[in-house]
Amino acid sequence: MKLFLDLPFALNQQFRQKIVSNFKTLSDSYQFILDSVKKHEEKDHAHRAESIDYKNRDVAKELDYQNGRISRLVLGHNGDGMQELRDSRTAIDSSEHEVLSERLSYDLNALNKKADDVTQEVVDARNSHPKLTDRLDQVDDSIENSRDILLSNLDILDSIGQVPTREKSGDTKYPQGFAIDQKNNVFYLVRQTTGSVNDKTIYEYSLEDISLIRQRQLPFDVAGYIEGLAFRHNALNELEFIIPINQHGGAYVVYNFDTNKYSKKIETEMSNKTGIDNNRKYFITVKTDHPNQNTNSKSSGFNIYDLDSVFNQKPKLVRTLNFSRKAVIGDYKIQSFIMIDHTIFLSQGQHTTVTTAIDLEGNVLKRITFDKQDLSSAIGLAKAGVTDEDIFEPEGTYFYRHKGKIYLVELICSQGQACLVRHGFFESGVKVEETTVKGYGIADLPAQNSMLDNGTPTLVFNNKGDILKEIEALEDPGLYFLVCVGKVKNAPYGASTLTGWVYTRSTKATGANADRAIIEVTDISDRKFSTTLDTNRNPAWRDWQQIAGIPVVGDKEIKKLRDITRSGKYYFKADDVRRIEDMPERFVSLGAVIKHEVVSNTFSVQTAYRLNADTGYAAPAVRTIANGELVRESGHTDKYGWRYIQTAQ
């Protein structure tokens, strides 16, 4: 059982998620114990014979002994085999048969039926669980402990080692990607000058003493940067790399480092920014909205492939992950990334190192950068004289295993050194002061913005805002949290102080030239509303639907208001009002809310209000219902028994 033990001090969203996860784990474990006990009670064969003691041995050995005695008795009875033949007429279920052929036919038919039953069980299980195929198809709710420990300790840093950023003095090649091969106690580094010069070289270094073992210049043209080094050892134990060869597109080759040969060009939806996962099952590339776009400026998600299929030159796409660029990337371009236990860790930035963690839904889990003087000291560089103007550029990301745990390693280049920096390693790491991530890149969103603790953008609307127009103006697809202070235009009738979320996505890449949004909000009375916005429809958005809380009632659900049986507030749109005969006559041209109060089993009071989208509701009317009949009171009432408290405006 894996529980979160390192809970945050603040009562924030992360605290809630971990508490909920702990309770779910406890509940699932408890249910598993109950199911196991029940299965044990109901199972025909609850114990193995080996686990039951009989005198000085277990039952299995005793049965073997007795079966041996019986066999010797059968064979040795008279030596002519007649007793053995008679004994063979007993079927598996102990039933007796007159002749041997009947017994054989009986047992074979029983086995055939059992095989058919098992086959049907397999088919039924497959049909009832169609997505139990790949871990990425249906993400597990229980996240492995190593990932969460790592997220909590990204500010603990130490250095594995460092090599010069340049191979030698005067050289123009600079690190672009790296990978660690712990099995062979080495790491690999690719250096190149620019994306247009064919001088890409892969180096192999010892992890033990950081000495250079061997190197090879790539024997083919690469029209771009190689940002990521996915490797494997093939069946002949030869070292192979996946090398992208286009500036931004999806062409790549499989390069054999030992033979210095490479495969034919293979086209797919990949890019020059690549990574893998810690289990070495997946090959991940940055995706853009359209083919051949610059991943530095147009990143919008990841393509996740089966790793073996890519090395076998038949790439199989497992999943596509989308994110909001402004929320996930901001002003910091992706340099490299790695997936560790369902979380993708991105090394970002050009002038500074920004480490970002996102889940497989594209939500930011954590984003940090560090004080440059502290960082310089932690990774073994000079601390004196370091200022905010110094460059700390991340050029690679990989994982590192130690004593059953997984650690994040970044290749950070500064002061002429390429440093292998490990996160979360307590044995030799030191805590480095975090600094504020600057220039987050969402200031140009069309509403006032603030950031939640986990970095997800929040849209904040004031009394003068129009919720639907503001959402329609969003440029980037993704998940947004929404807060409406007071009343805003196009909100649900009578609803104020709304909180909720907006999920937006674009279909422009498919040629549909449309944007869609799903919106869900909760008001101060805990009523939940939902609507959708689709710029490819006319009108672009549909009316709000109440999905929880006290219901909005239309004429299809109730004909007479006097038939309401439970207390609560009931909201009606203007077109509903015209068709409900029990409505106050003065309210028929506008929306209305009816407050129904059940006083006793036979007595209830209804108060009606005229709705106004800008100011709430006003102009109340009251009526009383006893034993299902209207109670006529003194003063003016209309034909439905409503007595007006004030003149309707």
Image (spheres, rainbow, N blue to C red):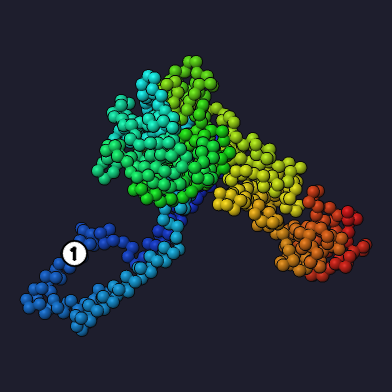
Question: Residue 478 in the image: x percent, y percent?
Answer: 58, 45
At label 1, the amino acid type is: Asp
Q: Is residue 234 above or below residue 570?
A: above
Q: 442 and 455: which one is in front? A: 442
Mark 1 crowd level (few <14, some 14–19, many ≥20, 10 Å Cα): few
> Image point 24% across, 79% down: which residue?
105
Locate residue 257: give its quadrant. Answer: top left
Q: Residue furthest top?
A: 385
Locate residue 56: give its quadrant. Answer: bottom left
> Image point 36% across, 71% down: which residue?
117
Q: Which residue is mark 1?
A: 64
Q: 533 and 37: which one is in front? A: 533
Question: Residue 310 in the image: x percent, y percent?
Answer: 37, 47
Q: Is residue 33 visible?
A: no
> Which quadrant of the figure contains the C terminus?
bottom right
Q: Is residue 645 left or right of residue 262?
A: right
Q: Is residue 310 left or right of residue 287?
A: left
Question: Residue 152 in the image: x percent, y percent?
Answer: 48, 35
Q: Is residue 290 above or below residue 372?
A: below
> Image point 71% across, 66% down: which residue?
557
Question: Residue 645 in the image: x percent, y percent?
Answer: 89, 56
Name the secondary structure under disc 1: helix
Q: 270 and 332: which one is in front? A: 270
Locate residue 607: give its quadrant. Answer: bottom right
Report the number of discs.
1
Q: Is residue 216 above or below residue 133?
A: above
Q: Is residue 620 above or below residue 216?
A: below
Q: Residue furthest bottom?
A: 98
> Image point 44% across, 32% down: which residue?
195
Q: Residue furthest left?
A: 79
Q: 46 and 457: which one is in front? A: 457
Q: Is residue 222 left or right of residue 556?
A: left
